[in-house]
Amino acid sequence: MKTISVVLVDDHLVVRSGLRALLGTQADIAVVAEASTGEEGLAAAAEHTPDVVMMDLAMGPGLDGIEAIRKLRQANPRQAVLVFTTYDSDADIVRAVDAGAMGYLLKDAAPEEIFSAIRGAVEGRSVMSAPVASRLFQQMRNPEEILTPREAELLSLLTQGLSNRELGRRLFISEATVKTHLAHIYAKLGVETRAAAIATAIRREGMR
Amino acid sequence: MKTISVVLVDDHLVVRSGLRALLGTQADIAVVAEASTGEEGLAAAAEHTPDVVMMDLAMGPGLDGIEAIRKLRQANPRQAVLVFTTYDSDADIVRAVDAGAMGYLLKDAAPEEIFSAIRGAVEGRSVMSAPVASRLFQQMRNPEEILTPREAELLSLLTQGLSNRELGRRLFISEATVKTHLAHIYAKLGVETRAAAIATAIRREGMR
DNA sequence: AGGCGTATCAGCCAAAAGGCTGAGGGCACT
DNA sequence: AGTGCCCTCAGCCTTTTGGCTGATACGCCT
């Protein structure tokens, strides 16, 4: 059995060394490099061409995790990227997946889960922590299902080009509340502007 | 032949009296009331229930012409509204038409044109000045035809949710130029925010 | 009783977008 | 030569959005 080479990218030293120690217990997995920023990660991956890159999404300044994934995949489509992060926000999952991540693990995942994710990744299987999987499935099945009724209502008006003030008037709520709902909608759709929200909402048909 | 009753709505006294004099030459047309603001126009129309309301679009503060048309049509769908204005901007035409205007005349129209527009309006025909007609037809045939190549390019990127800064980078132009193009696009599409522009652009298919 | 999700609202601040005016260069059509 | 359209850019000012924090209230489920 060939040894699987892994590069770790995480801005926390403790996480990297913990993970290195953990992976060290497996005979078929070898950590060949570590990096603490997106840029370093890209460089390390380019140098070692590992089978798997494990990457945190939240990394201080500079290149963010999502962009790093995209570039890694571009540079070498054969290396698998596993997201290894603390939070399972809807937006991050969606974006990581469509940036090309092979799997999405939470940092509290059981060791066995981590090992099998790595082994699965090199074989082309994608593995993810249970809570992540369930969120993602919901997204796939029906993107709007994750929106609350109120949010869906607001989104539908949003696609008609209304301003926050107008939205508030239509729904009999304050502009402050409109902004709160919008922030939630953006998070769930994985976008950060109303323009993008409208674009994705309309294209995900049903909303035309 | 029944006499056609008309209400004039225009903020310029000279225009109203000129029009009144002009229409006075026609035996079958009677001006029953005049108003100088949108609100007054609504009131006058409610009181006299004329066959035709002739309205300027640009009217000082208060209710603007487009909204006035909408309300007039709501209040009484049987009365025809003719827009009688100085300018033939793309945006105004589109908006007036979909607010329910039966015709769109420019103030430099020939008297005969005005008479026949009024007579046509009560019979359900819609009449408009030639330059207006040609603009409108273009819009109908192909909404994008009226956009310059550069504008179309920008609009297409816009529907992907990009910010002005990003648009500038993609097209190798300054943000200032992006804003100029956007302003033109908004005017041509008859909207005033990027959100609305995206919504209409995507829905006018082709842009998905 | 306590926790969770939903919906509501406020205030503050920074970034983005939009309105307005003006301006120069290139190109085509007359 | 002049006119008009397109593309480019700048500066200034206002409005709108978006990010963040925190708060209240209701209903549901355990």
Image (cartoon, coloured by chain):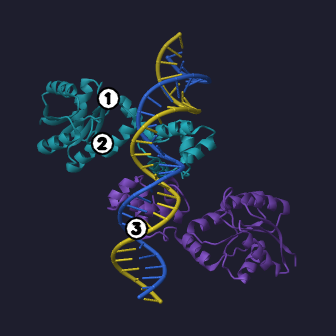
Chain colours: A purple, B cyan, C blue, D yellow
Q: Which disc, if any, is residue B66?
A: 2
Q: Is residue C25 left or right of residue B23?
A: right
Q: Which disc, if any, is residue A141?
A: none
Which residue is located at x 70 percent, y 73 percent? A126
Type of residue at label 2? Ile
Q: Which residue is mark 1?
A: B86
Residue A58, above or below A193: below
Give the distance between the C-alpha atoms of the residues marked 3 and 2, in whole angstroms.
31 Å
Q: Which disc, if any, is residue A150?
A: 3
Quarter-of-image position of residue B136 = top left
Mark 3: which secondary structure?
helix
Type of residue at label 1? Thr
The disc, 1 or 2, on the residue closer to the chain's N-terminal end is 2
User: Chain under label 3?
Assistant: A
User: Chain under label 2?
Assistant: B
Q: Depth check: C20 or B54 in front?
A: C20
Type of residue at label 3? Arg
Quarter-of-image position of residue B10 = top left
Q: Is residue A54 visible?
A: yes
Pointer 1 with pointer 3, Cβ within 8 A = no
The reply to the same-chain question for discs 3 and 2 is: no
Mark 3 crowd level (few <14, some 14–19, many ≥20, 10 Å Cα)? few
Query: In which quadrant will I find the N terminus of chain B?
Result: top left
